[in-house]
Structures are given as structure tokens and as C-alpha cells.
Amino acid sequence: MAGHNKWSKIKRLKEKNDAEKSKIFGKLLRAVSVEAKKTGGTMSPSLRAAMDKAREANVPSDNIERAIKKAGESDALESIIYEAYGPGGAALIIEALTGNKNKAAQEIKHILGEHGYSLAAIGGATWAFEKTSEGWTPKTTTSLSDEDEKKLGELISNLEENEEVQEVFTNAE
């Protein structure tokens, strides 16, 4: 039987692990590029923090340096915040980093639409959060049923699979 030997199993496992690593590395290197673009390639606290975060995830130093060099040559990446409501009325804040606002918005709308939700108006969900140095922390929380928690988990994982979505915050307990 083809595809049932030890090497095939190892190969499939390695492919899966490499794909997950690639997704994480891509997001972290995109954040390094944005910070390098903001500072013009000079070292700043925000660039240092982005580099440290990438190093914590074991991103190779060559890749970090390449992202900094590439930042001067590439188009400007923009940080965008989308707001939505998910299962059980849980507020969602979706932070994205993209070079094409329209593409990112359509992809996020599509993912939300697949689950039966849509984007909220500006300020529609941010009232439930407070911006801190770590990100968005909820001011008020919403308790969800087990079914809604499962739906919310699926929605968040689908959103995080998108390469342009950096983080998703929710006020669910």
C-alpha cells in the first residue's frame, strides 16, 4: 500500500508543522516590517519589541534582517481594526495588517458571512474594550453557552488562519 510507510507519516507531519510555523513567522515578520517602515530602519523601542517577539518564536535572525531591509523597498502596510459581533453577542475586534485594504475587508467579511455574522459599524464593538499596551482588554464580559463558545472558537480560528489578520480579541468569558 502506497503512502503508509514511516517516511510518508513523517513527511506529512513535517509538512503540517512547517505550514503552522510559516503562518506564525509570516505574521511576526510582517509586524517587524511595519515597525521598520515607521522608523525608517533605525532602531526604536517598537522595532526592538517586534524583533524580540519574533526571536521568542524562534524566527531566524536572517529572516528578521531581511524583513527590515525589505521594509524600505516595499509598499506601505497599514494596520486596520475591524469590529464585529459573534455568537451570543460576543464583541470581536480584529486587527489586520495589509497592503490592500479592500482585499482584507472582503476576506474578513467573507469569513464572518460563512458563519452568519457581519462587520459592525465603527465604534460598534470598541466600546466594550480598552486599549492597553498588550492589546485590547475587555471592559465588560459576556457569558456564552457551550454551543456559542464552540461557534466562537471556530470563527476565531478561521479568522486567524487568514494571513493578514494579526490578532482577534473578544469579550467572551
Image (tube, rainbow, N blue to C red):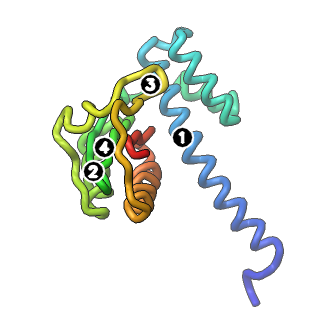
Kindly identify the amino acid type of the residue bearing the numbered disc 1: Gly
Circle on res. 89? 2
The residue that mark 1 highlights is: 26
**Residue lying at the far left of the rendered structure:** 121
Q: Nearer the viewer, mark 1 or mark 4?
A: 4
Q: Secondary structure at mark 2?
A: helix
Label located before the other in sequence (1 or 3): 1
Label located before the other in sequence (3 or 4): 3
Tell me how far mark 2 sits from mark 1, CA to CA. Answer: 31 Å
Kindly identify the amino acid type of the residue bearing the numbered disc 2: Gly
Kindly identify the amino acid type of the residue bearing the numbered disc 3: Val
Report the front residue among 25 and 147: 147
Q: Residue at x 40, y 51 (%)?
A: 159
Q: Could you tell me if the residues under marks 4 and 2 are in contact, i.e. CB atoms within 8 Å?
A: yes
Report the front residue among 130 and 146: 146
Tell me how far mark 1 sits from mark 4, CA to CA. Answer: 27 Å
- Residue 128 screen position, x and y as percent: 29, 34
Tell me how far mark 4 sits from mark 2, CA to CA. Answer: 6 Å
Tell me how far mark 3 sits from mark 4, CA to CA. Answer: 27 Å
Q: Secondary structure at mark 1?
A: helix
Label located before the other in sequence (3 or 2): 3
How busy is the neighbourhood of tag 3: few (under 14 within 10 Å), some, or many (20 plus)?
many
Circle on res. 91? 4
Q: Nearer the viewer, mark 3 or mark 4?
A: 4
Kindly identify the amino acid type of the residue bearing the numbered disc 4: Ala
**Residue lying at the far right of the rendered structure:** 6
- Residue 7 screen position, x and y as percent: 81, 71
Report the front residue among 54 and 114: 114
The residue that mark 3 highlights is: 34
Residue 151, quarter of the rendered image = bottom left
Tell me how far mark 1 sits from mark 3, CA to CA. Answer: 12 Å
